[in-house]
Image (tube, rainbow, N blue to C red):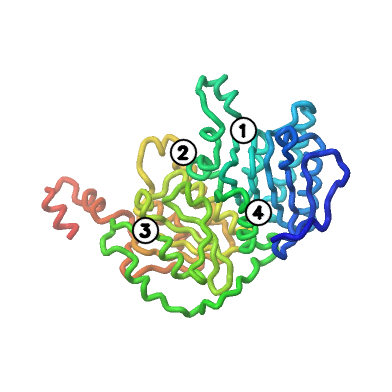
Amino acid sequence: MTNPITLQLRQGTPAHAVAGVHDLDGRPVMLIRAEDPEHRGALTPDDGDTLTTAATMALDKKLPIVLLLASSGADANHGVAALDGWGRAARVLAKASGVVPILAGVTGPAVSGTALLIGLADVVVMAEDAYAFVSGPVPVRQMTGVQVDVEELGGASVHYRDTGAASIVVPQDDVLPTISDILRFLPNHNSEEPPFQPTADPLDRAVPEALNLLPDTPTGSYDVRDVIRLVADDEEFLELRAGWAGNLVTGLSSIGGKPVGIVANQPMAIAGTLDIPASQKGARFVTMCDAFNLPIITFVDTPGFYPGKDLEWRGMIRHGAQMAFAYARATVPRISIVLRKSYGGAFIVMDSKTMGNDAYLAWPTAEIAVMGATQAAQILQRGESAEAIASWIE
């Protein structure tokens, strides 16, 4: 799948990390490997220098950065100097964020500073047996008295399902091929258009089966990914963070050969409402699409924000606003399609016309309102009998 490294950096340096310009399925990338099994991949100051040099060159030459990580963190034998190396690497990666794609593959442990690096990546692919955390089982037990193993604390399934840190989880041998598959939808840098995706799927293909996908009732469930695949080239949809915040679907596809980012409410999960994880997921994805010139297609079917004291106390206002902020400042072409309903504050947040999109479309039977009919009747007919409210709804 890949050719040998064509240019290796800092050759001869006594370090566990290696980096160089690599040909990844025809795409030049800066490949950084920090997965030496010696000392469980503990990284030295020289390793930090290697990462910093490689990321700086990638930023200068406008090359995507691919990180392959399996490290237990900074080498304690080198003291604070090892931490300093990680800090400098993180600083350069932060500068590169939004300028060149950063894709991380976690092939083993990612502990402490290494774990924080994956948080700087646009997309994270984790091997099934990998794990990541900033504080391991020993400090957890010492500080909290809770006994926990590495899998329970930060296994790949935890980051796929509960934290959202893992975009995709795959077998060990599929980490780099999956990164390559994702990269084909992304440009080399933010001043370049995403590469055209060859397809034999005609742009004017009719999809009459779409009429049968949506339930007749406003509360019936369906899988919005079926709708997405109908309009995608060759019905291909590469979903990202599918295991986390399942009430919002995000992923990459192409339409007419043009790569696009897709955001969609998922009625199969808490009725497609927006909560804190969904808002975080959507905001970060929209920001990535905007950085790398991916038009955004938004499929809307939501009754609003998920209600609850717990969500409000944990900052639903802040996180909901993050998603509105991401859409409002995005400059890429944006099209929204209301499939069935769009109510309340979520109507605004899901890239409504007031957010500045380029086209706002709706299914013939779609409803756009402040709230659903039942809730509206209960407010507008407050004090009336249940029979009167029911007749008003009808």
Amino acid type, mark 2? Gly
User: Which residue, given by chain and number where applicable, does mark 3 sit on?
Assistant: 342
User: Which residue, given by chain and number where applicable, does mark 1 sit on?
Assistant: 134
User: Which residue, given by chain and number where applicable, does mark 4 sit on?
Assistant: 176
Of tags 2 and 1, the one toward the viewer is 1
Q: Earlier in the sequence, mark 4 or mark 1?
A: 1
Amino acid type, mark 1? Val
Of tags 2 and 4, the one toward the viewer is 4
Mark 1 element type: loop
Of tags 4 and 1, the one toward the viewer is 4
| The N terminus lies in quadrant | bottom right
Q: Are marks 2 and 1 in contact (CB under 8 Å)?
A: no
Circle count: 4
Above or below for 317 versus 27: above
Residue 30 lies left or right of residue 304; in this view the side is right
Q: Give the class, few, some or many, for how many residues have Cα within 10 Å of label 4's Cα (few <14, many ≥20).
A: many
Q: Earlier in the sequence, mark 2 or mark 3?
A: 2
